[in-house]
């Protein structure tokens, strides 16, 4: 299963990178395969561990603010493994090299 999620505090001004960095630390500490991006983070794992990770990120952020905004996209495919890297590799093969 893959999730792509973003999480941010609401009402803390323009720069949110410090709060986002704390959530990304939890992703890294989870040991799950992930890809950090400019607008979201993709993580691969099982339902319970992924939803638990999102909850830990939420709880961490709520400790420092009163409101949190979260978006989650989920791709759940039976029997599929190593999809985080596999999906990128598949596109790169079709491009004939690394994605730009």
Image (tube, rainbow, N blue to C red):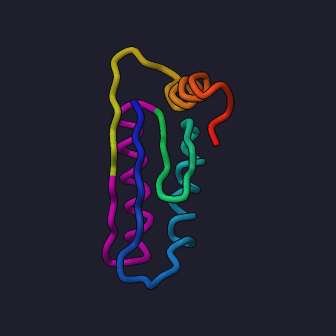
Verify whether residue 70 appears in magenta. yes
Q: Quadrant of the C terminus?
A: top right
Left of 49 or right of it: where is 87?
right
The picture quadrant where one finds residue 10 is bottom left
- Indicate whether residue 74 is drawn in magenta: no
> Which residue occupies the foreground of this view, 74 or 26?
74
Q: Residue furthest front?
A: 95
Q: Residue at the spot x=32%, y=78% of the render? A: 66
**Residue at horizontal 41 percent and vertical 67 percent from the top:** 8
User: Residue 94, image x and y in percent?
Assistant: 56, 23
Q: Where in the figure is residue 17, as x and y percent of width and height? A: 55, 71
Q: Front-most of 39 and 97?
A: 97
Number of numbered labels in the structure image: 0
Give the residue furthest to the top.
Answer: 79
Vertical placement of 26 versus 65: above or below? above
Q: Looking at the rendering, in which quadrant would you find the N terminus?
A: top left
Residue 7, x across and y down, in percent: 41, 61
Q: Give the range drawn in magenta.
A: 45-71
Vertical relation: 13 (above or below) 46: below
Picture layout, residue 49 above or below residue 64: above
Residue at 54% from the left image edge and 43% from the top image edge: 30
Residue 58 versus residue 86: which sits nearer the camera?
A: 86
């Amino acid at each position: 299963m893959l999730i792509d999620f973003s999480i941010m505090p609401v009402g803390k001004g323009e720069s949110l990178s410090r709060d986002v960095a704390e959530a990304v630390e939890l992703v890294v500490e989870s040991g799950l395969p992930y890809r950090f991006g400019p607008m979201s983070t993709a993580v691969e794992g099982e339902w319970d561990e992924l939803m638990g990770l999102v909850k830990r990120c939420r709880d961490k952020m709520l400790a420092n603010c009163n409101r949190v905004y979260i978006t989650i996209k989920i791709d759940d495919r039976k029997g599929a493994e190593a999809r985080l890297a596999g999906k990128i590799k598949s596109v790169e093969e079709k491009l004939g090299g690394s994605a730009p």
